[in-house]
Amino acid sequence: MPHCIIEHSINIDSNTLIPLVFNASLESSLFEQDGSDIKVRVLPFVHYQTGMLSSAATQVDFIHVTLKILSGRSTEQKLMLSKLVLKSLATLALKSCSTSVEVVDIDRASYSKIVS
């Protein structure tokens, strides 16, 4: 059931990122075997600042993935998921790009959902 939210600088192709995050999430074996519960969405940013700007500074691209998952997984499972996604994104071999991944628990007791 993860909600995988990819935020990235506009210079990076969203369509390249989506399958990398989806497949790494599926590879974790923490979710449905067919991937039917994995949701991936992308938010490209045109306007952003990374670090201090100066007249000589070059804007650094970024990718940040937030994986929102139902609570109950161990720290080891969450770290494994994070590392799988990061490793998958590293295959892009992007230059001057900061890439980060975080796993966030969704409180099981208060989560609600309707599928129609």
Image (cartoon, rainbow, N blue to C red):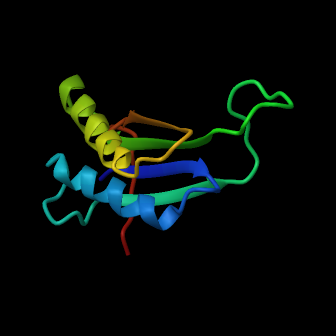
* Residue 49 horizontal side relative to residue 113, left or right: right
Q: Residue furthest right?
A: 55
Query: Vertically, is 51 above or below 15?
Result: above
> What is the x, y in percent for residue 74?
20, 27
- Tell me the residue at 19%/32% (across/down): 77
Judge by depth and name the residue closer to the eye, 52 or 114. Answer: 52
Q: Quadrant of residue 82?
A: top left
Task: Identify which residue, 113 or 104, lies in the foreground.
Answer: 104
Q: Is residue 74 visible?
A: yes
Residue 76 drawn at (x, y percent): 19, 25
Residue depicted at 26% across the width and 50% down the height: 25
Residue that sits furthest to the bottom in the current view = 116
Q: Quadrant of residue 101?
A: top left
Q: Quadrant of residue 32?
A: bottom left
Q: Residue at x 14, y 49 (%)?
A: 29
Q: Is residue 13 left or right of residue 30?
A: right
Residue at left 32%, top 44%?
85
Residue 72 visible here: no
Which quadrant of the rendered structure holds the C terminus?
bottom left
Q: Is residue 102 above or below residue 22?
A: above
